[in-house]
Amino acid sequence: MEHRTLGADGPLVLSVGLGAMSFGGMYGKTTEEASRATMAKALESGVNHWDVANIYGGDGLCEEIIGRFLQDHPGARQKIALATKSAIISGPPRRISNDPDYMRGELEKSLTRLNTDHVDLYYIHRRDPETPIETIVEAMGRWTEEGLIGGIGLSECAPSTLERAASVFPIRAVQSEYSLWSRQPELGLIDLCARLGTAFVAFSSLGRGMFGDAPLRPETFSASDFRAANPRFSPDNFPRNEQKIAAFRVLADEMGLPAPVLANAWVLARAPHIHVIPGTRSTTHLQQNAEAAAVTLTHEQMAAIEAILPAGFAHGARYAPAQTAGVEDYC
C-alpha cells in the first residue's frame, strides 16, 4: 500500500484518503451509524487522511459526526491527518469570505466540533477576490505558528493564486476536482504544486459516482443531492457520458480490477505528489477505494484508458452556475 507525504513538510499518509462530505447526505440519505462504521473501517484499513469542511451537511454536521467518533475512540485522532475548510457562507445567496477574522472564527468552531485542538490542514475553501490572497495566507501562517493548524491549503484555485500564496507562506496542499472526466488541473496546477513541494489532493476522483461498478440512475437523485443540478447528470448529457464510461467498466473488467479502483489508480499514476480523497459513507466502498493504493498501472494500461476516455470527453460543465462561486478559472 503506497504512502505519500502530504506536502513537503506534511505527514505520511496512505495515498487514498477519505472524503467526508457524504456523511451529511449530500449524495443521498445516510445515517450517523453508517458514517461511524466507515470511519472505523478507515482506521482498520490504514486510510489516515480524512477531509471535511465546515459547510458539509449544513452547520458543521459532518464535522460533528467526526468529532463524536473521535471522542468515542481515544487514540484515533493521533492516527489520522485531519483536514477541514472554510470560506463558503451558505445562502441564499451563497457567499464567499476570506476575511481573516471570519476564517479564524470558523476555525475555532471547527476545532470544537471536531473535538481536537488542531487540524493538520486548513483550507481556504474558495477564493474571495475582495480579500488579497496574501492577507489571508499571512494570517493563516500565524495560526500555523500558534499550533492551531499544521499547514495551509487552497481549494479550487488557479496556479496564479497558488504562486502568490506561496510567496507569503508555504502551502501544504491544493485541493481540486480531478478525475478521468475533470482534467483542468493538468493545465499548470499539478506541475506548479510539484515545483513548490505542495501536495495535490484530488477530490471527486470517481466523478461523483460515475466511475462506480454499476451505472448511476439520475432519476433517483433527491432534490438535495448535489448532482441533481449538475450539468453532467442532465437528461441530455448523462446518457452520452454513461455510454463512454460503460466502455471503461469493460476495460476495468478485462484488467481484473473494479472500475473505481482503476479510476483512482489512474489519478494516482499521474504524479507522485497526488492524493485522492474519494467520498463514501459505505464500508464496502471505503475498503475498495483503499485498494487503489496497491495498484501500479503500466504504460500500456494508461494508454488503453486514454484511448477510451481522452481528455475532454465529458458532456456538460462540471458545475452548474449556482455551484461555481469562488471557483477560479484559468487557461
Image: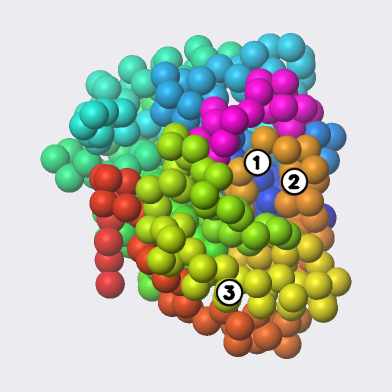
Please, what secondary structure does the residue beneath circle 2 have? helix
Q: Which of the 4 image quarters holds residue 210? A: bottom right
Instruction: Tell whether label 1 touches label 2 (CB within 8 Å).
Output: yes
Mark 1 highlights which residue? 280
Q: Is residue 48 visible in the rendered structure shown here?
A: yes
Residue type, mark 3 in image:
Gln
Of labels 3 and 2, the one closer to you:
3
Where is 175 relative to 222, above or below?
below
**Residue 214 magenta-highlighted:** no
**Circle on res. 285:** 2
Residue type, mark 1 in image:
Thr
**Circle on res. 39:** none
**Where is residue 47 drawn, in percent x and y?**
74, 41
Q: Quadrant of the N terminus?
A: bottom right
Q: Quadrant of the C terminus?
A: bottom left
Q: Which residues are magenta?
A: 23-40
| Chief SS of the magenta region | helix
At label 2, counting other C-alpha atoms closer than 10 Å, the crowd grade (few under 14, some 14-19, many 20 or more) is some
